[in-house]
Image (spheres, rainbow, N blue to C red):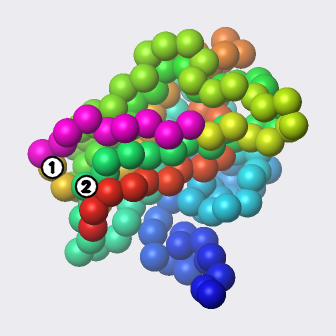
């Protein structure tokens, strides 16, 4: 049985975000694609984002993706965001938009909630993916509070 290794920590993927510093609150941004839950959120800035680049020469067609809440309390849950794809990291295409109430609910047992979304049929292949928050979270600020991103589809 293989042990899971965070792909960003062994340079298989690159994680970036809209912040100037490397850390996002409690942990390094590489935790976005890891399995360890950490408090991870941006500063209170409109249109904050977190992204994953899957590497040169790789492309991916997403069919679903899962987001994990990035805070140890029910504060700052996502409400309005886009899941986007790009082939060059500059020009972004909206793959899924969520514009509703809180999409995540904090579980009574204290575990961080995760939610899986389907990606409507897309005609493109992408190597860059990001989640960009375009409105306030459930706490009424612009901190993008995201502790995990998993993507499912075809390489």
> Which residue extends farthest bottom?
1
- Spatial distance from mark 1 to mark 2, Cα to Cα? 7 Å
Residue 110 vertical position relative to residue 7 in the rendered view, above or below: above
Residue found at x 75% / y 29%: 106
Report x, y in % for residue 74.
Answer: 78, 26
When the figure is inspected, residue 100 is found, relative to residue 153, above or below; the finding is above
Q: Which residues are drawn in magenta?
A: 115-123
Question: Do labels 1 and 2 touch, CB within 8 Å?
Answer: yes
Image coordinates of residue 86 in percent, x first then y, are 25, 49
What residue is rendered at 69% in x and 53% in y?
23
Asked if 112 appears above or below 103 in the picture, the reply is below
Q: Is any atom of residue 18 visible in this view?
A: no
Identify the residue position indicated by label 2 in the image. 61
The answer to which image quadrant residue 115 occupies is: top right
Query: Alpha-carbon neighbours of circle 2 within 10 Å: few (<14), some, or many (≥20)?
Result: some
Is residue 56 shown to the viewer in this render? yes
Residue at 18% across, 42% down: 122
Q: Where does the N terminus fall, quadrant-wise? A: bottom right
- Give how far across and how far down residue 150 sits, in percent: 50, 54
Q: Quadrant of residue 78?
A: top right
Q: Residue furthest front?
A: 1
Q: Left or right: where does residue 134 sit relative to residue 60? A: right
Q: Position of residue 39 (x, y in %)?
A: 76, 45
Residue pointed to by mark 1: 124
In the rendered view of the protein, which quadrant contains the C terminus? Answer: bottom left
Query: Is 117 colored magenta in this rendering?
Result: yes
């Amino acid at each position: 049985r293989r042990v899971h290794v965070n792909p960003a920590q062994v340079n298989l993927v690159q994680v970036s975000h809209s912040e100037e510093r490397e850390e996002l609150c409690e942990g390094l941004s590489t935790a976005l694609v890891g399995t360890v839950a950490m408090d991870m959120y941006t500063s209170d800035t409109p249109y904050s984002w977190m992204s994953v680049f899957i590497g040169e020469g790789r492309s991916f067609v997403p069919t679903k993706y899962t987001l994990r809440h990035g805070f140890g309390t029910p504060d700052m849950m996502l409400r309005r965001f886009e899941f986007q794809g790009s082939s060059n990291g500059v020009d972004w295409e909206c793959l899924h938009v969520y514009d509703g109430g809180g999409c995540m609910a904090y579980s009574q047992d204290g575990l961080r909630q995760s939610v899986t979304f389907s990606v409507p049929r897309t005609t493109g292949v992408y190597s860059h993916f990001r989640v960009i928050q375009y409105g306030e979270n459930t706490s009424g600020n612009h901190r993008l509070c995201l502790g995990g991103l998993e993507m499912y589809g075809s390489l």
